[in-house]
Image (tube, rainbow, N blue to C red):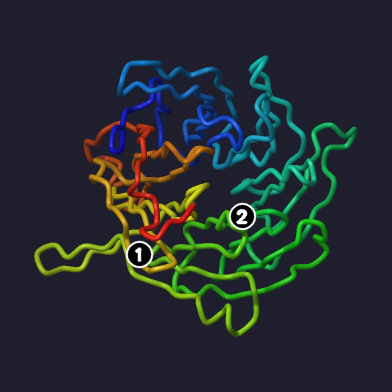
């Protein structure tokens, strides 16, 4: 089954901001887009024809949607440029505004331990929402810079901000960060993903580099952190460097995939510092990727990512697509003992 891939039906008509699989159902996928929609798909196996994928529901917003996530099998959340945080009901295809920020909602994660959504914004705040409460917004937490990305593993929340700042919180005590760090990379943070074993995280920049970081502040643990160049190519003697737009850890093997504006997706084993596979190049940049919860599929959004501004948008190109790739042993570390 490895390397079988197919495009989902009824893709968004503008660039895809986020693809996000359900944490419990390997066939449920949320897709948010600059076309102001969030779509829920039931992902089938179109490559073999045994079960076809279908769009189950669509949620309209007033502006581009930048972030989405699941809370359970029947509900999710979304947010974007209209600054509101919406609670999505998949059963009746309705949305309920549970709160808002004062600037765009840039990222969000759901904590099942807290039964709360954590949303992040360019307004420099993290906000916690419980849609079941009479007043859904539970708390708001100021940060020193605009927040670009957040990710959560267990009770550890990583917050990536402008000016290359990182804060690490224990979500059970959001009054102040447990650690404050500066990025190991010289340029703006473009993507972030936590290791699913809870040991650390990977982050990437607009300048074709990935850093692997560890939570343990001890000198021994910090000695293991490193950064490397990727999503680069020399064409006619000229070095081309592309942003790394997305990172995703495999739920079983703890290897990770990276996706860039060069249109490539690579799989890395960060323990041995090696690339395991680079998949065939896509016709457009790759804006977002996500493994499903059983690790059998990788969702890949390919679309224009505005790295070349308006001029790049005038070029004739393939319409936005969400590809579903069946993954095989290429995502498994060579020394896997599981």
What SS does tag 1 mark?
Answer: loop
* Of residues 142 and 77, the one drawn nearer to the viewer in this rendering: 77
Q: Residue at x 45, y 24 (%)?
A: 43
Answer above or below: position of 267 versus 57. below
Q: Residue at x 59, y 57 (%)?
A: 197
> Mark 1 and mark 2: span between their CA atoms?
20 Å
* Of residues 66 and 204, the one drawn nearer to the viewer in this rendering: 204
Looking at the image, how many numbered discs can be counted on the residues?
2
Q: In the image, is 9 to the left or to the right of 184?
A: left
Answer above or below: position of 123 versus 165. above
Are discs 1 and 2 less than 8 Å apart at CB? no
Residue carrying label 1:
208
Quarter of image, res 239: bottom left
* Of residues 307 and 256, the one drawn nearer to the viewer in this rendering: 256
Classify 10 Å Cα crowding around label 2: few (below 14), some (14-19), many (20 and above): many
Percent x, y of residue 80: 59, 41
Q: Residue at x 47, y 31 (%)?
A: 35
Classify 10 Å Cα crowding around label 1: few (below 14), some (14-19), many (20 and above): many
Q: Most extreme residue toward the front, as rendered? A: 337
Q: In the image, is 101 to the left or to the right of 63?
A: right
Residue carrying label 2:
150
Percent x, y of residue 162: 57, 65
Q: Most extreme residue toward the left, as rendered? A: 236
């Amino acid at each position: 089954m490895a390397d079988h891939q197919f495009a989902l039906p009824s893709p968004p008509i503008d660039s895809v901001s986020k693809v996000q699989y359900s944490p419990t159902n390997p066939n449920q996928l949320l897709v948010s887009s600059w076309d102001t929609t969030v779509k829920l798909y039931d992902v089938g196996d179109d490559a073999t024809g045994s079960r076809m994928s279908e769009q189950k529901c669509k949620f309209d917003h007033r502006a581009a949607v930048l972030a989405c996530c699941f809370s359970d099998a029947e509900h999710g959340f979304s947010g974007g440029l209209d600054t509101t945080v919406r609670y999505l009901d998949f059963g009746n295809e309705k949305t309920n505004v549970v709160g808002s920020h004062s600037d765009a909602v840039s990222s969000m994660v759901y904590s099942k331990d807290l039964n709360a959504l954590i949303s992040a914004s360019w307004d420099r705040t993290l906000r916690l929402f419980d849609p079941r409460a009479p007043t859904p917004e539970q708390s708001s937490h100021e940060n020193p810079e605009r927040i670009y990305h957040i990710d959560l593993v267990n009770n550890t929340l990583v917050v990536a901000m402008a000016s290359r700042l990182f804060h690490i919180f224990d979500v059970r005590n959001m009054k102040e960060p447990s650690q404050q760090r500066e990025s190991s990379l010289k340029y703006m943070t473009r993507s972030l993903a936590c290791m699913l074993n809870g040991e650390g995280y990977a982050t990437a920049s607009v300048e074709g580099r990935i850093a692997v970081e560890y939570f343990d502040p001890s000198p021994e643990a910090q000695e293991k952190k490193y950064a490397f160049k990727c999503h680069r190519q020399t064409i006619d003697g000229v070095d081309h460097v592309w942003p790394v737009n997305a990172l995703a850890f495999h739920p079983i093997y703890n290897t990770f995939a990276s996706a860039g504006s060069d249109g490539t997706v690579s799989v890395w084993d960060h323990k041995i510092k090696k690339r395991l596979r680079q998949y065939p190049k896509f016709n457009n940049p790759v804006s977002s990727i996500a493994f499903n919860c059983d690790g059998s599929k990788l969702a890949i959004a390919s679309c224009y990512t505005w790295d070349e501004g308006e001029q790049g948008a005038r070029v004739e190109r393939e319409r936005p697509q969400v590809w579903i790739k069946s993954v095989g042993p290429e995502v498994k570390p060579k020394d896997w003992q599981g």
